Image: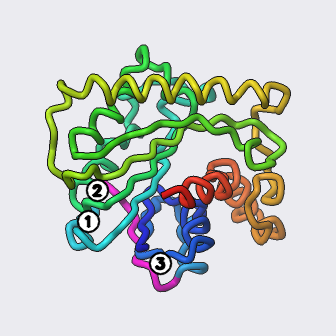
Amino acid sequence: MRHGSLFSGIGGFDLAAEWMGWENVFHCEWMEFPRKVLEYYWPNADSHIDICKTDFKKYEGTIDIISGGWPCQPFSLAGKRKGTEDERYLWGEMLRAIQEIKPQYVIGENVFGITNIDGGLVFEQVCLDLEAEGYEVQPFIIPAAAKNAPHRRDRVWFVAYANSNGLNKRNVNNEKHSSERRINAFSNSKQILSNFQNFPTQSPICGGDARLPTELDGITFSKWRAESIKGYGNAIVPQVAYEIFKQL
C-alpha cells in the first residue's frame, strides 16, 4: 500500500503506516519542527509545506490511502470554536487533495468538538463531502485510552472507502440509508466511551504516555524542546491509527 499524509504533524499516521509495512510516499506539514522530524525519519518521501499551495494532481491514481488530521482549533474546546469561520478551517483543502489524488481509502481525524459545533452540521458536511466523491463513510469515536494511553482524549475518526462503483460522484440527496448507518455507528461509538469515564481528558507531554516513541523527550535546546512538547500534544495516537489500518 502507498500512503500519503496531510497535516502530518510529527508523523503519527506515517509511523502507523510504517508499522503496516506500507510506503510513505509524501507528507504535508506547515510547521518547521514537525517537518524536520518527518524529513529525518522518512527522507525518501516527498515533503510538502503548504497544503493550500500544493498541487496533488501528480499523485492521481498512485496513492492507495490518504490520512490527515486537519486543524482542530476551529472545533476544540480549548479554542474559540469559530467553526467554519476560523481561518484555520482547512477541511476544504483536504477534500481538494482527495479529489485530485483519488485514493481508495481516506482516514480523517479531528477532535470530539467537531460532532456538535453548528448543531453537528460540520460533522455531517465532512461525511456528505466524501460521499459526494464516491466514498462510503463510517465515523468512529475512539479515545486514546482504547490503546492503553493513560488519558481519554476522545477523537473522531472518519473512515472512508471508495465504493464498488469506483470514485464516481453520487447524488448525496439519495443517501438516506448511508446517513442512517453513520448515525447508528456514531451512537454505538459513544456507548463505548463509557468504559473510559475516569481517564483524564488531557494528554501528557512525554512520548511514552502519548503512545508515541520517546526519541523527542531528550531534546534540551529550548526552542525545539518547546516545539517537541507541542508536537506531542497535537499528535494522533499512532496505535489507534494502526488498529484502523489493520482493518482495511
Can I make out residue 85 in this image? no
Q: Quadrant of the N terminus?
A: bottom left
User: Which residue does the numbered mark 1 point to in the structure image?
Assistant: 56
Say if 80 sits above or below 14 in the image. Answer: above
Percent of width and height locating residue 239: 68, 57
Say if 208 sits above or below 132 in the image. Answer: below
Looking at marks 3 and 1 on the same chain, the residue that comes earlier in the sequence is marked by 3
Q: Is residue 115 magenta?
A: no
The stretch of residues the image draws in magenta is 43-52
Q: Residues within 10 Å of mark 3 (few under 14, many from 20)?
A: some
Looking at marks 2 and 1 on the same chain, the residue that comes earlier in the sequence is marked by 1
User: Which residue does the numbered mark 3 point to in the structure image?
Assistant: 23
Q: How crowded is mark 1: few (under 14 residues within 10 Å), some or many (20 or more)?
A: some
The secondary element bearing badge 3 is classed as strand
Percent of width and height locating residue 126: 35, 35
Q: Check the image and name the residue furthest to the top.
A: 119
The secondary element bearing badge 1 is classed as loop
Residue 118 appears left or right of 10: left
Q: Which amino acid does label 1 sit on?
A: Phe
Looking at marks 3 and 2 on the same chain, the residue that comes earlier in the sequence is marked by 3
Which of the pair 166/132 is nearer the observer? Answer: 166
